[in-house]
Image (cartoon, coloured by chain):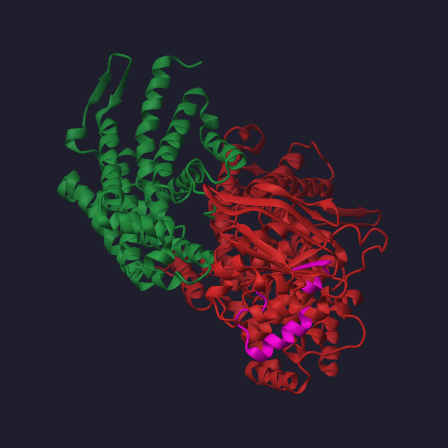
Chain colours: A red, B green
Amino acid sequence: MSASIAARRGSRWLPELAVAVLLVGLPFGFVAAFDTVDLLSRILVWGLFGIGFDLLFGYSGLLSFGQAAFFGTGGFVTAYLLTSHVVSNVWLGMLAGVVAAMLLSLLVGYLALRRVGLYFAMITLAFAQLSYFVEDSPLAHWTGGENGLPGVPPPAIDIGPVAISFGSGWGIYALIAGLFFLGYVLARFIVRSPVGAVLAGIRQNADRTAALGHSVPGYKLSVFVLAAAYAGLAGVLLGIFQSYMPPGAFDVDTSGQLVFQTVIGGVGTLLGPTVGAALWLFLRDELQQIPGVGSLWMFILGAIFVLLVTLLRKGLYGSLVAWWQSRIAVPAPQQRQAAMQQRDTAPRVTVRPHQSAAQPTPPSAAGAAATPALEARSLSKNFGGVHAVSDVSLTVPTGEIYAVIGPNGAGKTTFLRMLSGEMSPSGGRILLRGHDITGHSVTAVNRAGIAKSYQINQLFNDLTGRQNLRIASLGRHRGALRFDVFRAADSIPAVEDSIADLIDELGLGATADLPVSTLPYGEKRRIELGLALATLPSVLLLDEPLAGLSPGERQDVIRLIRRLAQGRTIVLVEHDMDAVFALAARIMVMHLGRPLAEGAPAEIRRDPEVRRAYLGGLKAHAHA
Amino acid sequence: MPPTAVILSQAFSGFAFGTLLALMSSGLTIIFGTLGFVNFAHGAMFMLGAYAAYVVLTYTHSYVAGLIAGALVLLIVAVVLERGLLQFFYVRPPEDQLLVTFGLSVMLIEGIRYFFGSDSQRVSPPHWGDGIVNFAGIFYYPLYRVEVIGIAAAFLLALYLLLYHTSVGLMVRAGIEDRLMVGLLGIDVRRMFLLVFAVGAMAAGVAGVIFAPLSAVIPDMGTPFLIQAFVVVVIGGLGSFGGAIVGGILVGELLSVTTAFNPDYSQVSIYLAMTAVLVLRPRGLFGAVGRI
């Protein structure tokens, strides 16, 4: 294990090194084959464009069909500033182009990111089309309309005796390759950083990422603007490379070509788009030479694209990378079996003399006793005319386990969703240690100290248990929104210690390093609980934590809940009556959205109304 | 301020274009509503309809034959694509569905380009569409453009009757509300999906046939139309039939009337309207709460 970690550390810079070697070596091959390095320059412009897009689509799951807007804006702002001599310093003009693309993306992102999925793709496409028409007509005086802007000058370095112009051929290649390398290195840093971990969380389950205290809108907008910066820089480089900025940069086909190249090469690989661009440009240039087939080059690319999307979603380069990784890694089933065995021989749940690993900071002693940890005052929720929850109040002192029971449809889950901030109440107030948190977002509520584990697992399925817990723990340790891109996600000692303790406490053992999707249900259930715990909540909301577990697993989790209750407040919704009566200090019975009774377990057991409405109809072990 | 006659004439134009856009968008919207995916090949299907009209009208000069051919071609294309490929994408993430229809759209466009070239083809309006209508001496208008409104409206009405006055339509609408439940009720969801995809594709194809005599027929002609249909459904609310009609006419009018004032802002205006809707009513004018 430690040897493999050492090997991984040693190969940390291997991809960067390989890219650097290729960027220096490949152009000689291109010159030998095509007499010019220009094709490679063009590939790298698209590749740089694609690195930004891959951060957006491949890593964050945001499929934009409108990247042309930023590509064109970057290119045209620079081209205009330089050709009209408003700015004489070429470097400054380039910077202005990139900044302009980022500013536009801030506006487009603010509007488009209000919607997700298909809507997001359609809206970005529409805004790109808008920018095309704005360039074409109202701004034609500055942009040249459909003629574009010729004569974009190249930058130069001129320090006394040293004067290098990045004009054409090798000069412009050096500039493009240098910026491509910087762009790649930066993207690698981001992907490995805590920011990259949160983006992966957003891609797989944005709602849960928000519930773990991360500002999902903030990260989405940030990565959108970042992708626009890459697009803008690529557009700037295109104008300089061609000495001409074409209006086609804004065209919907530009956005389409980028999506094509990225998917063909492979999403989530950073270099996939460059491979896709190479294939695209090569087919375009070479296939066109062949009579009869030439005009079909786009059709062939389209067919390749459809085939890859259908059968090889990882793309060409992505599949190659995956194949390589599977060769050097231990075969997955074998690894899984070994991990399971190790877990089974280890004690299920470590019973520890000292305090629980995920212990919250204890509330200040003075006044803590007087102020209840959690208070709900006549909470209500209506859906249209349906009163899902009406006039439910509760007061839970610190350290108490409070259970909410009732038949299905009683409004328990809705009630819990209001407490966790997932749903804002139609009426009533929620107080956390005396502070009003009514109507706060789920992210704000989590940051205030309430975490929920869900009835249906809400995990990041492609990631390992450890990575799942890391996303949760990062929220607590580094705030809702932070751009710490120059450190690795797994390099924060406080986070790693807390995850390691949690893995111990949950009895996950070596299964923690397997992808969650490959784990059995019981393990997933414990990771679900672990995600909530990793945010170190002072109030823990548990929505049917025992659902679907075997009797043995139930006993483990019941013991765990009891231990977690030390210094922490727990609101529990559960159908397992044995568990509820064994754990809870007080119980509320809900029926048809209203509280029916509240009291100590013994009182509830005796309550005639409760017996009639709920318990009476069920045997002690029934799980309604 | 342009003369009133110009504005009126443009408003009329906008209405004609709007009904076509509504027909196109209603196809997009029912496919989304039932199957849950946005058909990026919808613009290419529109283009196929126009080429079907071009071929059939060139040889038969029968407009009705053109309409039937447009519908038939799209029926075949839709059945082949849905059975052969798209049915395997219902369980995949929405992004994959979007990508595969995008790839199909490129193949359709490039396939047509291979056979017909990139040159624009002309389709003449039907003989009963020749002539000029005099609108009370205020403005004059080509007869076919007046008839377009009636033809597109007739197809919209047929679509409406199919959706709202047949048992099949009831199933489709129930499917839009709750796909899982309809499946649980024992309705063959697979056949319903195929039906809806075919009907939606045929709506695009018929819109293409009707549009063919009004414009140059080229392989790329569907793309701007597709993007305008996106604007329509964002404004009207994706998945809403009424939204597609109101949004279509609204976008048609905006495009056309703005031209009377300043053609530079004609295209820009519809995106500004879309932005306004996104800010003020993100789910669209008629969109249901909670659906995407």
For image coordinates 74% across by 39% down, the residue present is A89
Residue A603 at least partly seen? yes
Look at the picture and state if B27 lies above or below A300.
above
Provide the residue span drawn in magenta.
A533-561
Question: Eyeballing the image, is A605 above or below B218?
Answer: below
Q: Nearer the viewer, residue A604 or B159?
A: A604
Was residue A560 drawn as part of the magenta stretch in this picture?
A: yes
Residue A94 horizontal side relative to residue A57, left or right? right
Query: In the displayed structure, does residue B247 sit left or right of residue A78?
Result: left
In the figure, A297 relative to A77: above or below? below
Query: Which quarter of the figure has residue A542?
Result: bottom right
Q: Residue at x 23, y 44 (%)?
A: B162
Q: Is residue A244 visible?
A: no
Position in image of residue A535 (x %, y %): 71, 60
**Residue B163 at x, y percent in the picture:** 27, 44
Q: Position of residue A111 (x, y in %)?
A: 56, 40
- Image position of B118 (left or right of A215): left
Q: Is residue A446 left or right of residue B258?
A: right
Q: Quadrant of residue B119?
A: top left
Residue B76 in the magenta stretch? The answer is no
Is the N terminus of chain B in the top left, top right, bottom left or bottom right quadrant? top left
